[in-house]
Image (cartoon, rainbow, N blue to C red):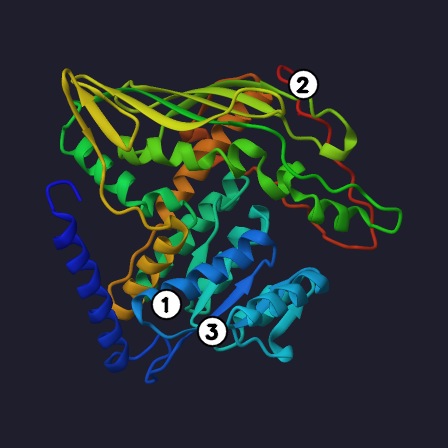
């Protein structure tokens, strides 16, 4: 990458893989006093969860590290069994007694002898499940975002600190942080390639996503879980669930989180009850400690122009986070571009095998909180400050989850009115 030749880079990658493979044969696994393949359990058996399990198996093959997916858990039996069948066809080894379902399925999986837990349930469940996995001393990969409210973000931060004390690795699903092009470009920005960053822009504007209609025999809870994108207590709204990727990049570039958010948004096209109560567009201005501003836009409306990108402006140049321009001088990343979904798993496995833990919990918790801060500004029509978020007692998780009781859908947030 950069000034390193392609041949030298490939030698480095090959050498790292050989070192990792050799290390596995002599270094105890995550289970004290034992050696052998690292055992993996998946919690949350939707498409992204099954994809994450496949990615960690691919990463193991790439590194020559033994990896066995041995357990799956989901609220719904059909999802858990479907994941078992699909992953076993791909080379996993999931026995029937390691297929768990129900609201407490995650606890049963964590009680097994897995070394690594993959968390891919709807984000509203992430803080509790992450905390449980860390308390059980498991390494964790957790999808983004990691919470939907301030209470959840702080729980993740605290559990992440405990993971450091236990020597555990924690990787989040912000795969751009594992992309070679982003890593090399942002390193150069931090080294001063474009001067001090004074403005930034982040976008995730696309068409609509899938939606699940409620059938007559569905309880409120089942419908909301199967249609989880459209309920803030489960997804955080799409500024949190999806746009956190781009927001995280700008936080990474800036080296910190914003101090305030001033935003707006609404529900202009997705207005039917099948879309729950979330918005379909947001626009938020975030201010950073040095006075720099980020304009953040996200939209999920069909028939509109799309844009998924990040852009930063410095005192000496500008960058799209995959290269930079300074006057007449331009640099573009042209090195290897491995699949970042697999690469994040490569970094996780390498850290475990080498005994050099990595921990992304604080970074992703801060980026999640940033997105929540923007959402709350749009929902209320008020400026929201980071200091207020860090003290807020807002918790969106229902006090009781039951398939036998009603779970009313909250009203659509209306700016300028009490919620």
Residue under numbered circle 2: 268
Can residue 139 be seen here? The reply is no
Residue under numbered circle 3: 114
Q: Residue furthest front?
A: 7
**SS for dot 3:** loop
Q: Position of residue 132 (x, y in %)?
A: 50, 62
**SS for dot 2:** loop
The residue drawn where x is 83% and y is 55% is: 404
Q: In the rendered image, which quarter is residue 32 located in? A: bottom left
Residue under numbered circle 1: 60
Q: Position of residue 74 (x, y in %)?
A: 64, 61
Please tell me whether mark 1 or mark 2 is closer to you in this view.
Answer: 1
Left or right: 407 in relation to 37: right
The residue drawn where x is 33% and y is 65% is: 62
Label 2, residues with CA under 10 Å away: few <14, some 14-19, many ≥20: few
- Give the mark nearer the N terminus: 1 vs 3: 1
Please tell me whether mark 2 or mark 3 is closer to you in this view.
Answer: 2
Left or right: 156 in relation to 82: left
Which residue is nearer to you in this view: 77 or 329?
329
Q: Position of residue 76 (x, y in %)?
A: 70, 60
């Amino acid at each position: 990458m950069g000034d390193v030749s392609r041949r030298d880079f490939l030698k480095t990658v090959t050498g790292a893989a050989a070192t990792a493979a050799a290390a596995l044969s002599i270094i105890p696994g995550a289970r004290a006093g034992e050696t052998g393949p690292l055992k993996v359990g998946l919690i949350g058996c939707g498409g992204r969860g099954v994809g994450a399990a496949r990615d960690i198996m691919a990463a193991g093959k790439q590194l020559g590290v033994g990896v066995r997916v041995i357990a799956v858990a989901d609220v719904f039996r059909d999802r858990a069994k479907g994941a078992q069948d699909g992953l076993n066809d791909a080379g996993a080894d999931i026995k029937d007694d390691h297929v768990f379902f129900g609201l407490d399925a995650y606890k049963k999986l964590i009680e097994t002898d897995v070394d690594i837990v993959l968390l891919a349930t709807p984000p509203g469940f992430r803080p509790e499940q992450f905390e449980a996995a860390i308390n059980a001393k498991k390494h964790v990969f957790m999808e983004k975002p990691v919470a939907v409210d301030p209470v959840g973000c702080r729980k993740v931060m605290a559990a992440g600190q405990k993971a450091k004390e236990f020597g555990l690795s924690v990787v989040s699903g912000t795969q751009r942080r594992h992309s070679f092009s982003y890593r090399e470009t942002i390193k150069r920005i931090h080294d001063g390639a474009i001067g001090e960053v004074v403005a930034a822009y982040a976008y995730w504007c696309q068409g609509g996503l899938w939606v699940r209609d409620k059938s007559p025999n569905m309880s409120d809870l089942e419908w909301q879980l199967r249609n989880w994108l459209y309920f803030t207590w489960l997804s955080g709204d799409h500024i949190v669930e999806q746009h956190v990727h781009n927001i995280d990049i700008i936080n990474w570039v800036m080296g910190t989180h914003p101090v305030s958010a001033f935003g707006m948004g609404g529900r202009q096209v997705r207005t039917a009850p099948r879309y729950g109560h979330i918005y379909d567009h947001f626009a938020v201005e975030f201010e950073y400690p040095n006075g720099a501003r980020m304009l953040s836009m996200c939209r999920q409306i069909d028939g509109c122009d799309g844009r998924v990108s990040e852009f930063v402006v410095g005192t000496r140049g500008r960058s799209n986070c995959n290269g930079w321009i300074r006057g007449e001088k331009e640099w573009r990343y042209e090195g290897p571009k491995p699949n970042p979904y697999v690469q994040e798993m490569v970094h996780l496995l390498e850290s475990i095998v080498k005994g050099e833990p990595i921990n992304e919990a604080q970074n992703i918790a801060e980026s999640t909180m940033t997105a929540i801060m923007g959402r709350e500004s749009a929902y209320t029509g008020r400026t929201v400050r980071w200091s207020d978020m860090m003290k807020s007692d807002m918790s969106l998780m229902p006090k009781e989850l039951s398939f036998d009781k009603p779970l009313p859908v909250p009203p659509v947030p209306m700016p300028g009115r009490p919620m």
